[in-house]
Image (cartoon, rainbow, N blue to C red):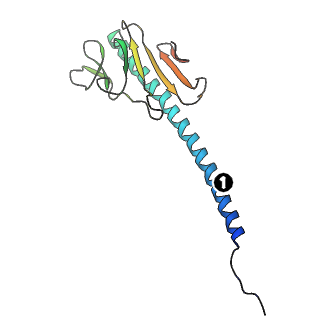
Amino acid sequence: MKNSNKGFTLIELLVVIAIIGLLSTLAVVALNSARQRSRDAKRVADIRQVQTALELGYSETNDYPTAATAVELGTGSQLVLCNNSGAAWQASSTGCSTVFMGLVPQAPTPPTGNAYTYLSSDGTDYSITFTLEGATGQLDAGGNCANPDGITAGSSC
């Protein structure tokens, strides 16, 4: 008489489950790495956009918005960059004769506490600091800086 047991043994099922678990773990790790690189690419693109808007404002008003203490861009009263008798950050475009940047970007999260901070004591120069999660191109992981001369690695301009 033939044995008609048609099915998988417990060992076979455990091996298949272990292989599926290993493959899904590798996929999640690769996905998280891609997300981090995507956020860093967005940060660099945001800073370049802000720099372009600042240069447009400078060409029209002959100054950069002044901020004696560092301000966080993309939040509160720093949502719009416009000409309001000189380049200025504002909460809305009301009173602007020219809008240089309609919506100033906010840094993506994580990490928490990450922000684009702007500083210009006299309107002749500026610095924007931002944080990258990993090295991107010639920029370092951690703090980086942008000024009228471009974007530089490291948090000091």
In the image, is residue 40 above or below residue 83?
below
Residue 18 % position (x, y): 67, 59
Left or right, 66 with respect to 148, comes to left
Residue drawn 71% across the image and 83% down it: 5
Q: Secondary structure at mark 1?
A: helix
Q: According to the image, label 1 marks what residue?
A: 22
Q: How many labels were placed on the picture?
A: 1
Rendering coords of residue 35 (x, y %): 53, 40
- Residue at (71% x, 73% y) in the render: 9
Q: Is residue 23 shown above or below 5?
A: above
Residue shown at the point (68%, 59%) measured from the top left: 19
| Residue furthest out toward the right | 1
Q: Is residue 108 left or right of residue 153?
A: left
Q: Residue lying at the far front in this picture: please name it.
A: 10
Residue that protrudes farthest toward the bottom in the picture: 1
Q: Residue furthest left?
A: 95
Q: Position of residue 96 (x, y in %)?
A: 24, 21
**Residue drawn at (25%, 12%) of the image:** 85
Which of 70 and 149 lies nearest the eye of the viewer? 70
Q: How many residues crowd mark 1 within 10 Å: few (<14), some (14–19), many (20+)? A: few
In the picture, the quarter occupied by the N terminus is bottom right
Amino acid residing under circle 1 = Leu
13 and 31: which one is in front? 13
Tell me which corner region of the image, top left, top right, bottom left or bottom right, holds residue 71.
Answer: top left
Tell me the quarter of the picture where residue 33 sits.
top right
Image position, residue 102 (x, y; %): 32, 28
Q: Residue 143, relative to residue 30: is it above or below?
A: above
